[in-house]
Amino acid sequence: MTNIRRNGDRFTTKRATDTLRPISLAMASSHISFDQSKGHTSALQLANNIKLAYALLSSGNLKLEENKDVLIPQLVIDSTGFRLFDANAILRYVLNDFEEEESNEYNFAVSSLEAFASHKDPIKEHLAEAVQKSLDNYLTSVEEPLSATRIVIFANTYALDPAAVEARITSLPERLQEALKLAKTKIVRSSTDYKHTGAVNVSQEHLMKSQDAEILPKEGERNILITSALPYVNNVPHLGNIVGSVLSADIYSRFAKGRNYNALYICGTDEYGTATETKALEDGVTPRELCDKYHKVHSDVYKWFQIGFDYFGRTTTEKQTAIAQDIFMKLYDRGFLEEQTMKQLYCPAHKGYLADRYVEGTCPKCGYEDARGDQCDKCGALLNPFELIDPRCKLDDGVPEPRDSDHIFMSLDKLEPEIKKWVDEASSKGNWSKNSKTITQSWLKEGLHPRCITRDLVWGTPVPLENYKEKVLYVWFDACIGYVSITANYTNKWEQWWKNPNNIDLYQFMGKDNVPFHTVIFPGSQLGTGDDWTMLHHLNTTEYLQYEGGKFSKSRSIGVFGNNAQEIGLSPSVWRYYLISVRPETSDSQFSWSDFAARNNSELLANLGNFVNRVVKFVNAKYNGVVPDFNVDNLPGYAQLKKDIDEILTNYVDNMEKVHLRRGLEIAMTLSARGNQFLQDNKLDNSLFAQEPAKSDAVVGVALNIIYTVASIMSPFIPETSEIIYRMLNAPALRIDDHFNLPIRPGHNINKAEYLFSRIDEKDVEKWRSKHSGKQV
């Protein structure tokens, strides 16, 4: 009889060579069972099963017993009831090879390597040393004929570090290859093999840097000052207003910060002017009360849309007055301001001068009947209200009458040579958007003329001249200076941003109707002072976003306005994603409810959401949320995958640097699609986990890092979603890079999956379309 003793939950035989001599397997019915014990580590299972598979393949009369009740290694001789329960003993018995049982090689294989394989959390450094010793001293050659001892040490070493063995031993005997293949299919891995501790193991070198409490330019870094057109304070912004300026600027700001540039994003409400005075009169409040109300309205809308201003201010401040008056006086002292008497339209019905925008009539250029006194919305021509055919007061339809009034004009004709030279250089160097260049050149082509910069109002920045103390600065001279004063309210060191042209790149975002004031009037004001101003580097403008084939109209309740979006109940990410996907960069575009739903369902939900949740759920289900000890050498196509992702990232960064935001979003989504393809190519499922553990480990390790990269490059567009993904990954914000890295390392613990998006039903689309169709037929 064989003397058998139990060791823990494994059965081993005492060395009893004389009594372990096998009966002839050719003469007996025999069965062998693989190691599928849940109490064994996956490494020990693999080591045991390699030995058992080799034994099975070495005997033509052994049969494999598939019995879910038998989970431990076992050899049974049916005729005698003889049983063995230790993989090493079974291998020796079947091969009839009991040599070298006292050798250093065998003792090392059992006492060291097998001990590591049995341990659920071995010390990695010690394990690596043991594997290296085995490869250097015992596995220098793996060739036929193979002894039982050599198979044991190979199996134990391979189970501990498959990649290291495969890197050293490039070819194996055919039977051993088949045994290895068969053994991998018999491993039963469990999430209980992995202990979730909340551990974080993420490479620090690839992370986004934290923002300083006060963002100031830094020597040796790329410093970017970002502004979006200051929204006028007397209305609620609609989706076209949002995508045209603040959202576009926010996306570029987040991209710049994601690249670890030193960036400051400034905006605020434009609060002075006739429109504010008139609206306050209509509402029965003071201009200040009106401004306070709508400043909060705008601020709340932008917060919900996750517009990440570093500072959101306003123009009705003491610093605005001081800086605007300083610029005015420097222009005055240097001879770039002149006095003229001009006719203004006065409305006798409500006894007040009319701001240009409150005079409406027929455009002399294109015949549009609702052109404003300052600009035609149809053809874009800048107008003088006296040019309008059949002018009327917008407030009461009264017929305005001309009256003389003395005003200050800015001598743009004197500044024209400097302005033209600057435009030629800045538009080329800063890669202005096409429509920005076209609109500016159209203005310059007609020649610059003195332009009035004062108005007969009370609500505005006072003109700092004794004879004009009853007048205020014209809002379009004053408003652009708001960028400077708002920065000054953010930091007393504002001149480090605004008077530092050699170290600052100024990026400005707006709708096309605002272009001339940012490319001619404000730069002309800066040049005229003689100060060393930071001036416009890149100008990015949009065309108009239409609504379902028509225009947004607050008065007729047509279209979605900032406050409406919140009421619908979708994430801000869905709105941001759609608005950028239809951003009117080169021509007018349409907001369509059907397209809105389709992009959510097919792109966000089916592409991005499916990719992220499939991987995160799998890692939690199979690995208990623990990133396995993966090696990309176990992925045959990894080199091509990395090449593909590197190309995507390089293309993405290139387009985003050029502020091609819509194209940048399209490219970012291709990375998610490539991630889905990667999962399909490698068939990530339960079978891969059970039968090809090394490959499964590599697939999930790489997939998690693709998700991490997707979160980083999508964060400028859908920051809330990226934050959720970072939370699922239990990882800090990742820097936007132009090469694919693997910052999430083995041993890192992730969190549970969360839903990113939900399906939009057609019935919801119809409900929302009906609600926001207003009086439009």
Image (cartoon, helix red, strand yellow):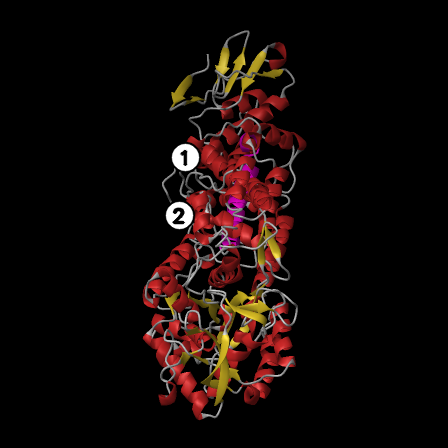
Checking the image for residue 195, the label placed there is none
Q: Secondary structure at mark 2?
A: loop
**Percent coordinates x, y for residue 719 in the rendering:** 46, 52
User: Quadrant of residue 751 in the image?
Assistant: top left
**Percent coordinates x, y for residue 35 in the rendering:** 50, 24
Give the residue type at disc 2: Val
Q: Secondary structure at mark 1?
A: loop
Residue 665 drawn above or below residue 275: above
Mark 1 surroundings within 10 Å by alpha-carbon count, few (fewer than 14), some (14 through 19), many (20 or more): few
Label 1 sits on residue? 119
The answer to whether one can see residue 76 in this image is yes
Dominant secondary-structure state across the stretch colored magenta:
helix
Relative to the observer, which residue lies in front, 397 or 602?
Answer: 397
Q: Which residues are magenta?
A: 689-715
The answer to whether one can see residue 108 in this image is no
Label 2 sits on residue? 200
Find out whether residue 379 is within the magenta segment. no
